[in-house]
């Protein structure tokens, strides 16, 4: 009767409603087991994913730091090459590869030598000013005496007044001393010091330092004048080796490295 007619449709609907709680109750253990397994599986997967993300974050941070370092070095090289373009002389870009550990000697080592036609007495600059001069040359490296060394002196002149003086190192990278400055000399704090060109060692016009302090004690003949080097002696990584007219310079003209 149920197969051939629709007389029992109402009865079937009533019985289905009555049986539904039994079906749901019978399915609860299976659903609970699946949910329990899925919960633990999801936690393990999340832990693994979190661990993977932490590793990726660590690698990205390391790459970001490296990128920041490369960007800073690129900016320094741009400044250096910009300074090279302003110079009339032929120049060669060199990189610092060593520092003298003796605190009494202000010296660095660069990666250019006789093979690059570097010579003793050659002026060395960074992007900001005069750093020093070459004092020893080997085939592939050279030793640079910084202007902050006690044994180094450079003739300078005050940009504002053209007063000629001598700047000597003090053994401190951030300080120079001007020798034999009369109490009546036309010099002020903030005056810029340039190489004067006297002595035929350093060409004229290179920035050397800025006057920081003037101290005059009664009874003394000269003032005590301190200046801060313009060059970043303790931070520069790349330098310019300047070839004067006396020397022919490297094999190619202009800035090279």
Image (spheres, rainbow, N blue to C red):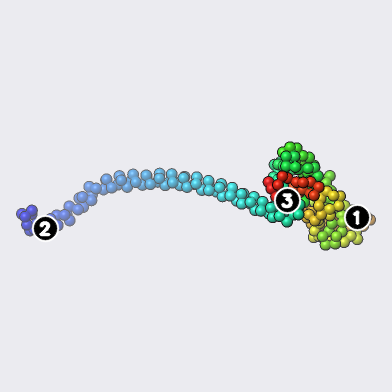
Q: Nearer the viewer, mark 3 or mark 2?
A: 3
Considering only vertical position in the picture, is 57 above or below 139?
below
Residue 83 position within the rendered picture, expressed as x and y whole percent measured from the top left = 71, 54
What label does residue 9 carry, if any?
Answer: 2
Neighbourhood count class around disc 2 (C-alpha, 10 Å): few under 14, some 14–19, many 20 upward = few
Q: Earlier in the sequence, mark 3 or mark 2?
A: 2
Q: How far is disc 2 from disc 1 in space, using C-alphas? A: 122 Å
Taking the image as shown, residue 78 lies to the left or right of residue 233, namely left
Taking the image as shown, residue 3 lies to the left or right of residue 37, namely left
Residue that numbered label 3 is attached to: 126
* Circles 2 and 1 in contact, beta carbons < 8 Å: no
- Image quarter where the N terminus lies is bottom left
* Circles 1 and 3 in contact, beta carbons < 8 Å: no
Residue 94 position within the rendered picture, expressed as x and y whole percent measured from the top left = 70, 45
Q: Secondary structure at mark 1?
A: strand
Q: Secondary structure at mark 3?
A: loop
Q: Earlier in the sequence, mark 2 or mark 1?
A: 2
Residue 149 seen: no
Q: Nearer the viewer, mark 1 or mark 3?
A: 3
Q: How far is disc 1 from disc 3 in space, using C-alphas? A: 32 Å
What label does residue 94 carry, if any?
Answer: none
Residue that numbered label 1 is attached to: 222
Neighbourhood count class around disc 3 (C-alpha, 10 Å): few under 14, some 14–19, many 20 upward = many
Neighbourhood count class around disc 1 (C-alpha, 10 Å): few under 14, some 14–19, many 20 upward = some
Q: How far is disc 3 from disc 2 in space, using C-alphas? A: 98 Å
Q: Secondary structure at mark 2?
A: helix
Considering only vertical position in the picture, is 244 above or below 114?
below
Taking the image as shown, residue 95 lies to the left or right of residue 150, namely left
């Amino acid at each position: 009767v149920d197969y051939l007619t629709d007389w029992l449709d109402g009865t079937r609907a009533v019985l289905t409603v009555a049986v539904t709680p039994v079906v749901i109750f019978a399915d609860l253990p299976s659903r609970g087991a699946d949910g329990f397994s899925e919960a633990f599986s999801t936690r393990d997967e999340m832990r693994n994913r979190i661990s993977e993300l932490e590793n990726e974050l660590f690698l990205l941070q390391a790459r970001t730091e490296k990128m920041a370092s490369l960007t800073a070095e690129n900016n320094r090289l741009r400044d250096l090459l910009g300074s090279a373009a302003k110079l009339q002389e032929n120049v060669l870009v060199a990189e610092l590869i060593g520092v003298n550990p003796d605190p009494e000697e202000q010296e660095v080592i660069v990666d250019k030598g006789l093979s690059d036609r570097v010579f003793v007495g050659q002026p060395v600059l960074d992007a900001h000013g005069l750093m020093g001069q070459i004092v020893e040359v080997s085939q592939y490296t050279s030793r640079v005496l910084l202007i902050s060394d006690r044994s180094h002196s450079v003739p300078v002149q005050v940009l504002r007044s053209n007063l000629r003086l001598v700047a000597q190192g003090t053994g401190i990278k951030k300080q120079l001393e001007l020798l034999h400055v009369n109490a009546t000399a036309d010099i002020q704090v903030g005056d810029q010091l340039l190489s004067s060109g006297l002595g035929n060692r350093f060409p004229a016009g290179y920035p050397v330092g800025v006057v920081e302090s003037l101290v005059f004690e009664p009874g003394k003949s000269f003032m005590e004048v301190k200046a801060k080097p313009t060059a970043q002696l303790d931070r520069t990584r790349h330098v310019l080796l300047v070839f004067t007219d006396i020397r022919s310079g490297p094999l190619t003209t202009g800035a090279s490295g």
